[in-house]
Image (spheres, helix red, strand yellow):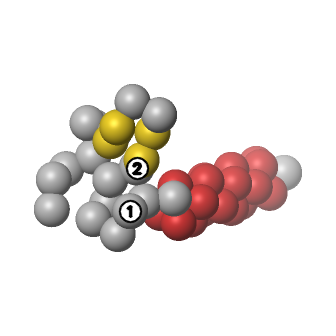
């Protein structure tokens, strides 16, 4: 049962990561309403 929960969490994290990567501007930065997310490294 624990394995199924672990797989579910990993797949959910993968979906979130893919969405986050899709939303970047191509340089690894995420555009926000206030500009760019400063947590992301500059290219």
**CB atoms of marks 2 and 1 within 8 Å:** yes
Query: Would you place residue 28 above or below residue 39 in this image?
Result: below
Whole-percent x, y for residue 4 in the image: 80, 57
Q: Picture coordinates of residue 15 (x, y %)?
A: 65, 61
| Disc 1: which residue | 25
Nearer to us in this view, 34 or 37: 34
Q: Quadrant of the C terminus?
A: bottom left
View extreme (right): residue:
1
Q: Is residue 17 visible?
A: no
The residue to which callout 2 is attached is 30
Count of numbered circles on the image: 2
Residue pictured at 39% horizontal, 30% vertical: 34
At horizontal 47% and vertical 63% (from top left) the residue drawn is 21
Please give the label number shown on residue 38: none
Q: Residues within 10 Å of mark 2 (few under 14, many from 20)?
A: some
- Please state if 31 lies on the left or on the right of 3 as rendered: left
Residue at image point 77% right, 49% down: 5
Q: Is residue 4 left or right of residue 34?
A: right
Is 13 in front, or is 26?
26
Q: Kindly state the secondary structure of the residue where label 2 is placed.
A: loop
- Farthest residue in the left direction? 43
User: Tag 1 or tag 2, which sits nearer the N-term?
Assistant: 1
In the rendered image, residue 11, in percent from the top left (x then y), is placed at 68, 61
Residue 8 position, x and y percent, is 75, 55
Q: SS at mark 1?
A: loop
């Amino acid at each position: 049962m624990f394995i199924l929960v672990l797989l579910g969490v990993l797949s959910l994290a993968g979906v979130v990561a893919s969405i986050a990567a899709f939303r970047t501007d191509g340089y690894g930065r995420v555009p926000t309403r206030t500009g760019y997310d400063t947590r992301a490294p500059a290219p």
